[in-house]
Amino acid sequence: MYVGLKMIRNVVTVSPDDLVIDADKLMEENRLWMLMVTEKGKLVGFLPKEDVRAAMPSPMTSLSRHEINYLLSKLTVKKLIRRDLITVGPDTEIEVAADLMDKNNLAGLAVVDDRNSLLGYINRTVMLEVLVEEMGLKEGGSRIVFDVEDRTGVIAEVSDIIFKLGISIISTSTFFHNSRRMVVLRVKTDDPAPVEQAL
């Protein structure tokens, strides 16, 4: 699975010359925590919601409404833009993107081509959807989890046992847990007992 297959394509963006007050409205209307900043289709940075909110006048300000409106009419995105944005390409493996997000505590990643043109965005919600899809949950069936020896051919042996029962495998995953190889299968049956017994 690659990022380009699952990325969000309709990304809300602003330009460096847009007003911060307009960016704030866009974030509210679209329920976003950040906006991508593009210039002539190229990604140049991002604008986090916390920076926008910090730049907005406090309700406790001593400025008049006229003064506030004047200041807001001059405050553009270019004054707040952050340029330390981590990006990935559309051919990045989804698990590599997830690892980047985890290691850097990111809610998402911009997806760009080799010319830095913004193609899309991938976030935690998409990653969770991929997990559900790859584990086959929405396909129904039954989930079976068991330990196996970490050796060549063990998954082929397990598949053969299930094949001989005439049951289809919906999804297969393997994980290491406490230095043991765990196999997680979703099989196309409502009664997993015969598979469990055979295994």
Image (tube, rainbow, N blue to C red):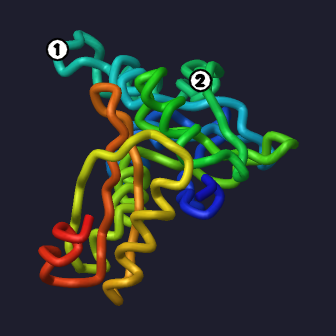
Give the SS element for disc 1. Answer: loop
Q: Who's the residue at 35% across and 62% down the image?
A: 135
Front residue (pair 182, 50):
182
Q: Position of residue 184 (x, y in %)?
A: 31, 56
Q: Which residue is mark 2?
A: 81
Front residue (pair 25, 172):
172
Query: Residue 9 sits in which quadrant?
Result: bottom right
Q: Name the side, left or right, on which 17 lies relative to 144.
A: right
Q: Name the side, left or right, on which 35 lies relative to 62.
A: right
Disc 2 crowd rating (10 Å Cα; few below 14, some 14-19, many 20+) is many
Instruction: Estimate the spatial distance between the alpha carbons at disc 1 and disc 2, rounded to whole Å.
Output: 26 Å
Which amino acid is tagged 2? Answer: Ile
Q: Position of residue 91 (x, y in %)?
A: 72, 51
Q: Who's the residue at 42% across and 21% down the image?
A: 51
Q: Residue furthest bottom?
A: 166
Q: Is residue 103 above or below residue 4?
A: above
Q: Position of residue 199 (x, y in %)?
A: 26, 64
Front residue (pair 175, 64):
175
Q: Which mark identifies residue 5?
A: none
Q: Who's the residue at 77% across and 49% down the image?
A: 41
Badge nearest the viewer, 1 or 2: 2
Q: Position of residue 165 (x, y in %)?
A: 31, 85
Query: Residue 147 sits in which quadrant?
Result: top left
